[in-house]
Amino acid sequence: MSREVSNGISSTEHTKLLTITAENDSATGSLYCLRKQLVVGAVTTAAVLLLCTSPSSPLSFLEWSQRNKIESSKPVRFPETFIWGVATSSYQIEGAIDEGGRGKTIWDKFCHQGIHISDNSTGDVACDHYHRMEEDVAMMKQLNIEAYRFSIAWSRILPNGTGGVNQAGVDFYNDLIDTLVGHGIEPWVTLYHWDLPEALQVKYGGWLDPRIVDVFAEYAQVCFLAFGDRVKNWITINEAWTVSVNGFSTGIHAPGHLSSTEPYLVGHHLLLAHSKAASIYKSFFQLRQKGRIGIANCGDFRYPRTDRPEDREAAERAMLFQFGWFTDPLLLGDYPPIMRQLLGDRLPSFTEDNRAELVNSTDFIGLNYYSSFLASKPAFKTADNSYWADMYVDFSGDAKWTTNDMGWYVVPDGLREMLLWISKRYRNPLLFITENGTAEKDDNLELVKQDERRRVFFESHLRACYDAIVQGVSLGGYFAWSLMDNFEWQFGYTRRFGLCSVNFQTMERTPKMSGQWYGATALANGANIDIENGGNKNWQHRRLLPASKYGRRVEIPKRVLIGYGSNMDMVKEAVYNGVNIVVWSFISIIPNRGGALQKARARNFNVVGSVSNAGAVLVTKLNLTALTLLIEDLSQNGFGDVVHLASIGGWNGGHLSPLVSAREWWITFSEAAGFIFDGIDWDLEGDDFLSSPSNVFAIDCLDKMGHISQLASEGKRWSG
């Protein structure tokens, strides 16, 4: 449908703004048991604190199961007003660069130079969203998405960046907005997501010229007039840091400049453009249209590498040179003092009028979070004046952190810490996660069906969001990046962030497993995410994958002794060297066949088994004497808090047979070993039914194993 741009401002009904009321129920009882989910071929687990039995009062399985009912569950309860959304950007998905009157952008030129994109691709077609918009909105509706954050291509509205309005471009976005509203999806509009009209780059030098501020404000006003009757949430600039640094310091983004001064000038003009557009909205549109306006800034959390003061200062300096650079002026009235100190006159100054406009310019702050780093003071300062040299920080990663297909560290706790840091520094402003996501290798449909790493990424980061809300952060919503695989800037189509897969030959869309999970989570308002102890902890729980009938485990934590029939001396040495979890492996119960094989098995000193000639386990019991003495010895020497776990099956996937059944381990654990072992690490035993009492018991033991193992992977000890 066509809706002409006029000079009038449409009036709409009042839209109630979001309020955050964090639920922080106090936990009752001594046991927390979180909801478990069983599916064919896989086990979904969550942290469970088990009551350890004592020699004087061992629990039977019936008693134990009665004390672990779901009533003590602590599921996530996000605020009722919490918004569940997805995000994209125009150049990354629209395509149709020569259709509908669209003008060229700096990214069109950058890509067609043929030297900047890893696969030599362009956004000429991208996801073909321009022609498949209705299909994409229907897909969002199918996934229970409540809000869609998209960007408007400036050059579709104003092909030359200024001057005459392109009605065809206005019509496209009107159709998109109307389709979203018709499906009950709230539109969130970003005015600038990096695709500057090429005409402005040629005429002014783009963001290097102060005249760009008024030109951007003109463009913003056209959008407020055209779409503001239905759009209630506006984001002016997406990641001003990325525009400034990647576009004008490192040159890996359009327009590809390499400079030590331009990043700060560009950043200055971006901030002034934001405040100018926001001032126009607040002065002439907000009262009638009942909307909000903000900005989306990127921020990765920086942990100090050591407790040395210089490393703590380096971590804080890194945060201020990234997030603080574009947030301090909006909420505190000027750039961070450390930037002024280190940059001198290379950092532009604000006038009093600038400051007055800046500090009243934002109703909310968007946070784009992807990763975290360890920060430390460099051994020496380099002679150049590049942005990274200006910051004067060395970055590294923690050996415990995993990486994704971008090579970025996956650190969910960093998101919580980032939110807390923002809340503290800026006196708890209203925040939204405007981007959070991960690139994983899932470029075929089989991988799409099992993109478990992405699902775990979203679950763990949403858990971090909930932690922050419980601790008082005003977080109003979460936008997953991205709705679908798309053109990933300098990486072309070689990196996939989507909740939905895109076949770039046929343009077929397929919701991934993670997308279906996210949709279910949105529908449940997060109630399907398990949080131990009311949500003030952030554990990444273990999951079994259907790689074999035993369900091989993945992501082995650090600081855990993998005990494949380990002997006492090995365990004691490992504990003295910092291991705080010992996994005792009792998988190899074989008859005495002599030779090297029997010698290798002799280390199973605490297992007694009777085995038939066919190799099937008939009777299996634990000889606890040696193990009890070892644990008493460790306790007397100050290592009483070491966790000991019984293991059924192999951590390294090399399952030996026959396995001790879960039934036998339940009998042993409940009757005799509960006062020694803190839990059982369990692999699916093929002879038992998943729903059998012994397997249900073993699943719960595995839940606890995941909780304790994650603590160990973070260098922490379980306190029980």
Image: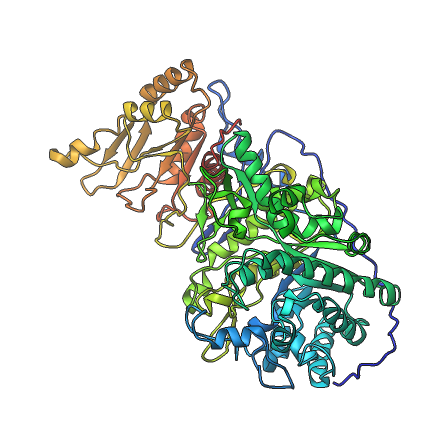
Q: In this view, does 704 lie above or below 14?
A: above
Q: In this view, does 118 lie above or below 47?
A: below
Pick the quarter of the image with the N terminus: bottom right
Q: Is residue 121 above or below residue 397?
A: below
Q: In this view, does 84 lie above or below 414?
A: below
Give the x, y percent position of residue 139. Answer: 60, 72
Q: In this view, does 88 lie to the left or right of 291?
A: left
Q: Which residue is drawn at 31% across and 20% down?
A: 626
- Residue sitting nearer the eye, 702 or 455: 455
Residue 570 occupies which quadrant of the picture? Answer: top left
Could you tell me if residue 644 is visible in this image?
Answer: yes
Give the x, y percent position of residue 223. Answer: 76, 73
Give the x, y percent position of residue 443. Answer: 42, 67
Q: Which residue is drawn at 25% across and 36% down?
A: 589
Q: In this view, does 684 lie to the left or right of 251?
A: left
Q: Residue at x 35, y 47 (%)?
A: 687
- Residue sitting nearer the eye, 601 or 302: 302
